[in-house]
Amino acid sequence: MLRITRMIAVGALVLGACAGNRSEPVRIWTSEPAIADYISRYNADREGAPVEVRAIERGSGYRELSGAESPPDLIIDRHLVKPAARSIFETVEGLIGDTGGRYYRSLLEGGRIEGNQYLLPLSFDVPAVMFAEAWDPPQDDRRTIDLIELREAAAAFNAIADGRAERLGYSPLWQDDFLRAAIDMFGVRFRSGPDEMPLWSRDGLQEMLDFLGTWSEGENAGAQTELDFQRRYLVAPGNRAVQNGIAGFWYTTAASYYSLPDAERTGLDVRWLSRDGVLPVGDRVLYAGVPRSAENRSGARQLLRWLTEEAVQSRLISANARAHEPQFGFAGGFSALHTVNERVLSETHPEMTGRVPVNAELRRPDIEHPLWPGMSSEVIAPWLANALRGEEQLALRNRLEGWIRQQEL
């Protein structure tokens, strides 16, 4: 909330600073507070079209844009890769030219539809787990822990007697964010079908339920044991339970972990969470798009060109690392330009040395259902948790049909 408040304040300062400029303003909607900080630098460094910043809720940009009477000139948000992206955004092919090799290939492809680039990736975050004594990482150059390795290490950490746990490595039921990451890891891929009803991989969903159910029942003595442990011991933030040796692991993301104060990370280590060598980043890619109905598309493209320059990103990362409230990486995560991560992050964040994700680890983001991510947080993750506890009475399709009807009211 403090970051959003600061973001709105920065937007107001930007407007005030540009009030005397007669050129046509550039209007931007963004859910990422760091972007507002960057815009203030953009206006301070050059003359030209002023930039007006409006803060939006993360993941809401596509929905708001679809019904906007006065659309922005540029929108920067997550969850923009939708079925209608080709019809509401104009191509930005000219901003890439022969520099496409700077980008993570899969992220760039995620914004490409039928051979044309409609969305440009700016940054991404990766799922991760923090740990202390529960796992001794192999002495190799891996940046990740595989999901099966996590389950095995968490089980080995358990201390359970007579159905009561004094120590648990990890439970899939503790964090909905973990369940949402698992959807991506198992390739369940909810997408649009007839009448906007979602389609998904039934095999992927069943495989995920089998894997997580075996974890809960076979390794942790069942859902009741896990939930009793959570009520007794996990009243403080999860990182403290790991530091105190009560829990073995806690789910997080790279940006969330490195945004913690140093004291909150004392004694902890972190690895990116993967499955079969793939990092699930689909829900965590920050894209930029220029709406077809924008009034100042040229100004938006100029700003977007600036934001995707390697030198600019390097300066912004270095400046943020020296700030009073340091920020991790670029625009809330790793830069979508792998060259920037490789050259700059190891300097500003020495702990990133050898941990920057590589092209081969990232899979192209799926084209999301129009009602994602609300569908994920409000229906699918709760349904998964209930199913794993043995409390779910309705099929997932029935839950989704009822929820979608409510969205149409």
Image: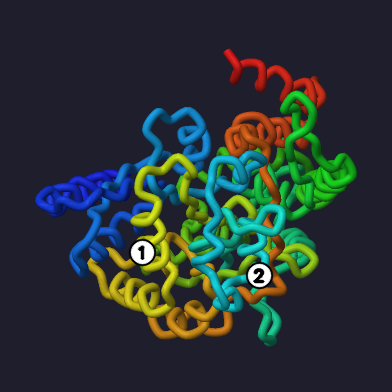
Label 1 crowd bin: few (<14), some (14–19), many (20+), radius 10 Å: few
Q: Does the CB distance between marks 1 and 2 fall below 8 Å?
A: no
Residue at image position (51%, 55%) is 286
Locate residue 185, reporting x and y percent: 74, 55
Q: Cα distance, mark 1 to mark 2?
A: 33 Å
Locate residue 309, reporting x and y percent: 42, 74
In the displayed structure image, the side of residue 366 where residue 334 appears, left or right? left
Look at the image and tell me in which quarter the N terminus lies: top left
Q: What residue occupies the far top of the structure in this picture?
A: 409
> Is residue 265 positioned above or below 169 on the image?
below
Residue at image position (65%, 67%) is 134
Residue at image position (56%, 69%) is 270
- Total labels drawn: 2
Taking depth in this image into account, of 286 and 203 the one nearest to the observer is 286
Residue at image position (68%, 49%) is 171
What residue is shown with label 1?
261
Secondary structure under tag 1 reads loop
For residue 258, what is the image quadrant? bottom left
